[in-house]
Every structure is written in structure tokens, then in C-alpha cells.
Image (cartoon, helix red, strand yellow):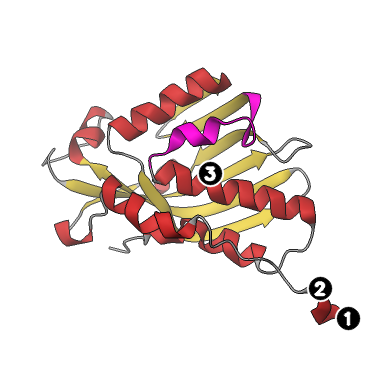
Amino acid sequence: MNVFDVRDVVKEPDALLAVTENPRHRAILLNFRRHALLEVSGRWQEILQPDMIVDEPVYRINENGTSLRLRGTAEIGAFYAGITDARANVFGPITDHVAVADWGLAIESLFGHHLPGRVLAEQGEDIDDPDAYYQLTHYMASFWPYDADCRLIGEHIYEDTGSRRIEKMDPADVITPEQARELLAPLFDRAPLGPDPAAHG
């Protein structure tokens, strides 16, 4: 099993930040970077602050054959709270392609998601041990539009349902929400500064 490293949630954004000079593109990448760290750390309340997200964001999430539409910070907050309360907030890219433009971000990822068996069983998956952890691996495409102030407008997420694979994890490979929060804490203040303009002079 190709187990993901939770610290890779910022690997591709950081690679882009290291070579991106455009101020708007950098602001979008920094917003996304912080969003990813907060979500996987279980600090979702900080995502919904007015400097991070618009007043009426819209999320469209298409996964496992279902389509979910969330509007406003109350609905989105309840969604995040449910994920965190279920201890299902540990996920990230195994491989990742990120492109930034004036409108926002386009991302394609092979995603790994550490999930308690009981959560997967509640979703209708055939799980033999509800107390074990499993890794859900699947391809995801997402689009993240941003407003004029580089605040998130929404998330549009699309799963390649046919790529879904669920495997029971060795307990030694499991990253718990508590471990994820500890591992990610040092990364909040380590965003690359970008290329040195003097290098082009």
C-alpha cells in the first residue's frame, strides 16, 4: 500500500510558491495552503474566518456516487464538524498536480484518506473490522475559485469513483487526528518566500 505522508498536504503548493512571483497567485496559494493545514489539523473553524472565505461560499462535492451542495458558512461548518467529530479528517495527496491562475486553482490528486472502519461501514462499504483503520485511495479533481480579495469562493470536487480502493492499514502506518495536528503545526509558518527578484537583474 502506498501510504500518504500527511505533511505532503503542502508539498505541491510550496513547490509552486517557491517559483511564483505574481502577487495574486501567491495570495491564492497561501490561502489554499493554510486551508489545507487547518482542515487536516481539525481546526476547521479558522477556515471560515472572513479573511479566508467569502460570506456565502458554495461547495459542490461529488464523491462515491453522491452529489452534495453546501451553501453558506453554517452548512459548510456543520460539514467540517461532522468530518472532524468522526475522526475522518486525516487525508492528503499521494501524488498531486496543482495549477494556479487569476481565477483560482485546479488540482488533480491521487488522494489517501485514513478512515475508521465504522465510518466506512456507515457509508455502505463492506468492512470486516469497524475498529480498524483503512486507507481509502482514489483520484480526485477539484477547482477552487477565489474572489477579488483572494478569498475562497467555494470548492468543486469530483471523484473518479472507479478508482476507489480500500485497504486495511497496519496500525503502525495509521496517522491519527492528534498525530496529524502535531505533525502539521510546524508547517504553518514555513511557506516559501518565492523567487528572489534580484536573481533576474
**Callout 3 amino acid:** His
Query: What SS does tag 2 mark?
Result: helix
In the depicted structure, whether residue 160 falls above or below residue 190:
above
Disc 1 on helix, strand or loop?
loop
Q: Could you tell me if the residues under marks 3 and 2 are in contact, i.e. CB atoms within 8 Å?
A: no
- Residue 55 magenta: yes
According to the picture, the residue beneath numbered tag 2 turns out to be 197
Q: Is residue 199 visible?
A: yes
On the question of residue 166 being in view, the answer is no
Decide if residue 40 is on the left or right side of residue 88: right
Instruction: Quarter of the image for the C terminus: give it.
Output: bottom right
- How many marks the image carries: the answer is 3
Q: Which residue in the protein does label 1 denote?
A: 201
Q: Which residues are magenta?
A: 42-56
Q: Could you say where residue 13 lies in the image, as x and y percent from the top left?
A: 59, 59
In the shown orientation, is residue 82 left or right of residue 58? left
Rendered location of residue 102, percent (x, y): 78, 47
Distance, label 3 to label 2, CA atoms, is: 27 Å
Say the numbered circle drawn on residue 35: 3
**Proximity of marks 2 and 1: CB atoms separated by less than 8 Å:** yes
Q: Residues within 10 Å of mark 1 (few under 14, many from 20)?
A: few
Extreme residue in the right direction = 201
Question: Which image quadrant for residue 129?
Answer: top left
Query: What residue is shown at x 23% (from left), y 48% (from top)?
Result: 134
**Distance Cα–Cα, label 1 vs label 3:** 34 Å
At label 2, counting other C-alpha atoms closer than 10 Å, the crowd grade (few under 14, some 14-19, many 20 or more) is few
Q: Amino acid at mark 1?
A: Gly
Where is residue 178? Give x, y as percent: 27, 47
Q: Residue at x 50, y 18 (%)?
A: 74
The kind of residue tagged 2 is: Pro
Residue at 34% across, 34% down? 84
Tell me residue 92's x, y (percent): 42, 52
